[in-house]
Amino acid sequence: MSKLTHLGADGTAHMVDVGSKSATSRKAVAEGTIAMNAAALGAIRDGAVPKGDVLAAARIAGIMAAKKTGELIPLCHPLSLDTVTVDCTVEDECVRVTATASLSGRTGVEMEAMTAASVALLTIYDMAKALDREMVISGVRLLSKTGGKSGDWFASN
């Protein structure tokens, strides 16, 4: 296993020094799903959830969360993001959230994309929980990351 970048020689945690790294264009894409009963899914699809437009709220929450990632995840750098998009797709038995974060900078945006997807999914749960308390959030994962010293990476499936 390669050396863990967030641990010093003595094993203590520290923030990685990215000061000497060159700024490059970086992008990350993450996704996750929330499965629910047909009634809840139909209400979301039809815009009939009593709390309002679930998908619009989820998109906004995901974007806001990406911007706050450095405050939420220990040792994560606060980043000046160029763009964040959150797409919500109603499928047969779930809503799929895909979040993309990008910037020109010295460190990656994987955590921002994954935070955006996670908080968007939690927002969907919060807004639709009166219709289905048994909703299941799953599959939150990184789909791809591009740019940076380690190069591009894409999920195998």
Image (cartoon, rainbow, N blue to C red):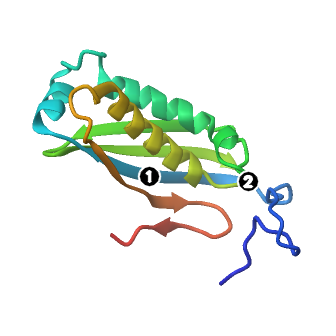
**What's the residue type where badge 1 is placed?**
Ala
Judging by the rendered image, the residue that carries numbered circle 2 is 106
Q: In whole angstroms, how far apart are the C-alphas of marks 2 and 1? A: 20 Å
Percent across and percent down for residue 65 are: 55, 35
Which quadrant would the N terminus be assigned to in this image? bottom right
Residue at image position (72%, 41%) is: 78
Which quadrant would the C terminus be assigned to in this image? bottom left
Judging by the rendered image, the residue that carries numbered circle 1 is 30
**What's the residue type where badge 2 is placed?**
Arg
The reply, left or right, for residue 4 in relation to residue 9 is left
* Image label count: 2
- Residue extending furthest toward the right: 10
Q: Nearer the viewer, residue 21 or 88?
A: 88
Specify few, some or many for label 1: CA neighbours under 10 Å numbering under 14, 14-19, or 20 or more.
many
Residue at image position (46%, 58%) is: 142
The reply, left or right, for residue 64 in relation to residue 4 is left
Q: Is residue 92 above or below residue 56?
A: below
The reply, left or right, for residue 11 in relation to residue 37 is right
Residue 118 lies in quadrant: top left
Q: Is residue 144 above or below residue 82?
A: below
Tell which tag, 2 or 1, sits nearer the viewer.
1
Q: Nearer the viewer, residue 7 or 24?
A: 7
